[in-house]
């Protein structure tokens, strides 16, 4: 490797893409092309970066398997940053295996981190944790250690483990300072701010207040009966730790039942009027006998579902929820509730997303996501650029709104 390639690589490692381009911008050999591609990615020109890295991979000979594997890792990183979540993971696995066999442990670990970050974005937390468990960050250079700890913190936030997340981010901050890369330090600072951002709202006894991640975690460990509007479950008992001992009743596939449960919980300790329940569950402004009959049927179904946790009894003006063992009933809601809030939460990370990537991350059809984006665009809440498959959507961060790291994840044992 010649001196210019070495100097450009060092500039990129230090977070100086312009310094790298000054050395290799006019060169078209394969090592220079891959460095130019990484530099363009750091500058935000992902389309040009992807093209350069692909040209570099084609430029390496048949005997340069390690160099081609590094190109695959670079292309995967560009795809991840540009939110192309459908890139072939098998190619990355094969590249990682080649790098491990060749003794390039640092780039092999980087490939693992890319895989974990993608799993985190699409909500596969169990698989992400298993993969992360096989990595020891101790031998990594500071920048790689910081990236590792950011992944640890991201998983901990989604698992509602605030103490673990804070410890990981403290280690990431120290490593980022050692690395001396401003962009990395800014990423760590942004993650730290998430811990101070309201992650949910607590609604109880007619009042509401925002909750930070630590407070949500504390609520998880409490004995209160919680109607969780983030995950559409009703639960009681500790849901934290390695052996959760709480009771969870999922209403995720029963929107009418959950709407009734939430209305009853918000009214507790008083009862909820029939008119309120009809409006919340069915959107009925002027109820007739058919609406009232349907309400009785749905209340019966809700009573059966909640029997382990609470009783639902009729009152003179409506229905009331009575916990069997808990002393308090609360509602845990998202900090900002509006139509298509889950789409906005992903876009709030400041990155440009394609509709296909959003569909993959949300577990929804692309057409459903596209309708949501069109609705948000008409309301002026999101904007797009590009055409066809290159079209991307973004929005500035919404104050007080959780980002993708705090989107609901499956409850432990739930």
Image (cartoon, helix red, strand yellow):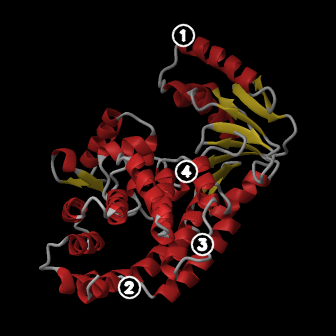
Reading the chain from its start, which is encountered first: label 4 or label 2?
2
State which tag comes first along the sequence, 4 or 3.
3
- Gap in angstroms between the C-alphas marked 1 and 2: 69 Å
Q: Nearer the viewer, residue 309 or 102?
A: 102
Dot 4 falls on a residue whose secondary structure is loop
- Frontmost residue, 230 versus 329: 230
SS label for mark 1: helix
Image quarter hosting the C terminus: top right
| Drawn side of residue 376 relative to residue 294, left or right | left
Q: Which residue is mark 4?
A: 334
Mark sitting on residue 14? 2
Q: Which residue is mark 3?
A: 137
The percent coordinates of residue 121 (x first, y second) are 47, 52
The residue that label 1 is drawn on is 290
Q: Which of the two labelled residues, at mark 1 and mark 3, occupies the earlier sequence position?
A: 3
Mark in the foreground, 1 or 4: 4
- Relative to 237, is 168 above or below? below
Please name whichever residue, 330 or 232, is drawn nearer the observer in this view of the structure: 232
């Amino acid at each position: 490797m010649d001196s210019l390639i070495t100097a450009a690589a060092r500039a990129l490692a230090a977070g100086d893409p312009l310094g790298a381009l000054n050395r290799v911008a006019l060169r078209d050999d394969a090592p220079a092309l891959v460095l130019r591609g990484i530099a363009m990615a750091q500058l935000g020109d992902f389309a040009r970066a992807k093209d350069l890295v692909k040209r570099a991979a084609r430029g390496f000979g048949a005997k340069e398997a390690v160099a081609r594997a590094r190109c695959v890792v670079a292309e995967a990183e560009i795809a991840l940053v540009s939110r192309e979540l459908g890139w072939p993971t098998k190619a990355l696995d094969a590249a990682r295996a080649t790098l491990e066999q060749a003794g390039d442990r640092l780039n092999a670990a980087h490939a693992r981190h890319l895989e974990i970050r993608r799993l985190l974005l699409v909500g596969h937390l169990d698989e992400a944790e298993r993969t992360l468990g096989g990595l020891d960050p101790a031998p990594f250079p500071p920048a790689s250690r910081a990236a590792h700890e950011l992944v640890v913190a991201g998983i901990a936030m989604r698992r509602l483990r605030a103490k673990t997340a804070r410890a990981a981010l403290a280690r990431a901050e120290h490593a980022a300072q050692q690395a001396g890369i401003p962009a990395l330090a800014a990423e760590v600072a942004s993650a730290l701010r998430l811990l101070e951002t309201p992650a949910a709202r607590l609604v109880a006894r007619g009042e509401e207040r925002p909750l930070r991640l630590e407070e949500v975690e504390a609520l998880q460990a409490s004995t209160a009966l919680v109607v969780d509007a983030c995950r559409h479950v009703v639960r009681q008992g500790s849901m934290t730790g390695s052996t959760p001992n709480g009771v969870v009743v999922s209403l995720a596939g029963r929107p009418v039942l959950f709407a009734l449960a939430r209305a009853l919980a918000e009214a507790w300790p008083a009862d909820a009027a029939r008119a309120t329940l009809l409006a919340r569950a069915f959107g009925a402004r002027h109820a007739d006998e058919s609406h009232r009959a349907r309400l009785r049927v749905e209340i019966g179904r809700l009573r059966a579902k909640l029997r382990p946790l609470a009783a639902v009894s009729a009152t003179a003006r409506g229905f009331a929820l009575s916990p069997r063992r808990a002393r308090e009933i609360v509602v845990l809601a998202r900090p900002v509730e509006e139509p298509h809030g889950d789409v906005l939460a992903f876009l709030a990370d400041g990155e440009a997303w394609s509709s296909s990537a959003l569909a993959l991350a949300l577990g929804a059809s692309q057409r459903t996501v596209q309708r949501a984006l069109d609705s948000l665009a008409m309301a002026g809440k999101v904007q797009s650029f590009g055409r066809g498959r290159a079209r991307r959507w973004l929005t500035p961060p919404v104050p007080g709104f959780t980002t993708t790291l705090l989107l609901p994840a499956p409850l432990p044992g739930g």
